[in-house]
Amino acid sequence: MNRTNKAKRDLAIRMLKVDISIDEVALMSGLTIEELNAIKSDLDKNDSEANAMKGFNFQNMNFDDINK
């Protein structure tokens, strides 16, 4: 990926994270709707994985039971 495409992608990611519509992001970034849908899908997947771990307390885990 060249620097111009990386800059467009980084811009799109920042815009999508603050809920700017895909149509507006496409207009401002020059990326296609298909490219943006793929980026948004990746963002949504990563956010759901991160949210699943929120509040998980590793300090209370007993790792001694893992190998039993």
Image (cartoon, rainbow, N blue to C red):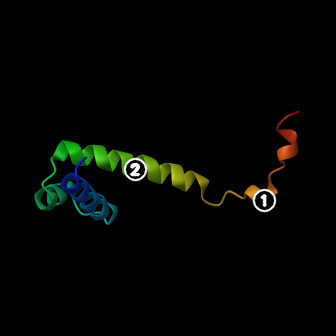
Q: As displayed, is residue 67 above or below residue 50?
A: above
Residue 1: where, in percent of width, then height?
A: 25, 46
Residue 54: where, in percent of width, then height?
A: 60, 59
Q: For this rendering, which residue is in front, 10 or 32?
A: 10
Please identify the quadrant where the C terminus is shown: top right
- What residue is rendered at 88% in x and 44% in y? 64
Residue 42: where, in percent of width, then height?
A: 37, 46
Label 2 sits on what residue type? Asp
In the image, which is nearer the foreground, mark 1 or mark 2? 1
Relative side of 28 to 47, left or right:
left
Label disc, if present, on residue 59 of the rendered structure = 1
Residue 34: where, in percent of width, then height?
A: 20, 42
- What residue is rendered at 38% in x and 51% in y? 43
Q: Secondary structure at mark 1?
A: helix
Q: For this rendering, which residue is in front, 52 or 7?
A: 7
- What residue is rendered at 52% in x and 49% in y? 49
Relative side of 42 to 15, left or right:
right
Q: Badge 2: how crowded within 10 Å, few (<14), some, or many (20+)?
A: few
N-terminal of the pair, mark 1 or mark 2, is 2
Label 1 sits on what residue type? Gln
The furthest residue to the front:
2
Per the image, the residue denoted by label 2 is 44
Q: Secondary structure at mark 2?
A: helix
The image quarter containing residue 26 is bottom left
Q: Badge 1: how crowded within 10 Å, few (<14), some, or many (20+)?
A: few
